[in-house]
Amino acid sequence: MWMERAATSLFGIKRYGVHVNGYTVSDSRKVSMWLARRSITKQTYPGLLDNMVAGGLAAGVGIKHTLIKECEEEACIPADIAVKAHPVSTVSYTYEDEEGVFAESQFVFDLELPLDFKPCIGDGEVEKFYLLPIEKVKELLATDDFKPNSAMVILDFLIRHSFIEPDKEPYYQELVTGLHQTL
């Protein structure tokens, strides 16, 4: 069965996407992350912070193919760099808005980028890219400035890379569990 992505909520069918955490590691081992500011003209979540690259999976299109396509379209990341992205996790959730109830899962990839690489605006879905130290990313994550599913993907990155640890975060278990909940 094939179905238009926009119609999935009418039938309770889960939607899937791909999110890429683009990051750099300096010679002194400091981690920084590339974030995108969504275009103000985007229909959903205009002007909010987002992963460097993200996109929905279309019927019949593979995950890695989607990743490479979205990298090229959104951030002008050449395919020879995009193919180095590693599948690392998934996040799953259910949300409701004026158009319905949506169950979604995102395939999460990490892509360590060369220090001299700078993403460029490609298809106009992004207004600007920022390379921020991971501590600044953590601060921003506690605000309402992120697209919600992107915040989950970044939270997953912070946990997997031990920037959030169970001895220091009293809600660690709840955070980890919350990254994998659907109704």
Image (cartoon, helix red, strand yellow):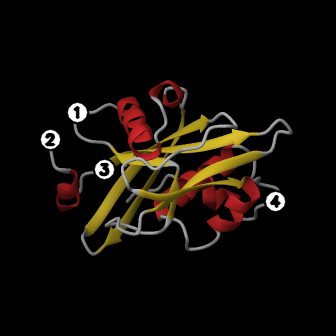
Secondary structure type for disc 1 = loop
Circle nearer the N terminus (4, 3) = 3
Q: Is residue 49 left or right of residue 6?
A: right
Label 2 vs 4, first from the N-terminus: 2
Q: Which mark is residue 60?
A: 1
What percent of the width, then of the height, locates residue 87?
52, 33
The image quarter in which residue 166 lies: bottom right
Callout 4, which amino acid?
Lys
Q: Secondary structure at mark 2?
A: loop
From the image, state whether disc 1 or disc 4 is nearer to you: 1
**What residue does disc 4 label?**
168
135 is higher (above) or lower (below) than 20: below
Tell me the amino acid under the disc marked 3.
Arg
Rendered residue at 55%/71% (across/down): 145
- Alpha-carbon span between mark 4 and mark 3: 34 Å
Instruction: Indicate the secondary structure of the residue bearing disc 3.
Output: strand
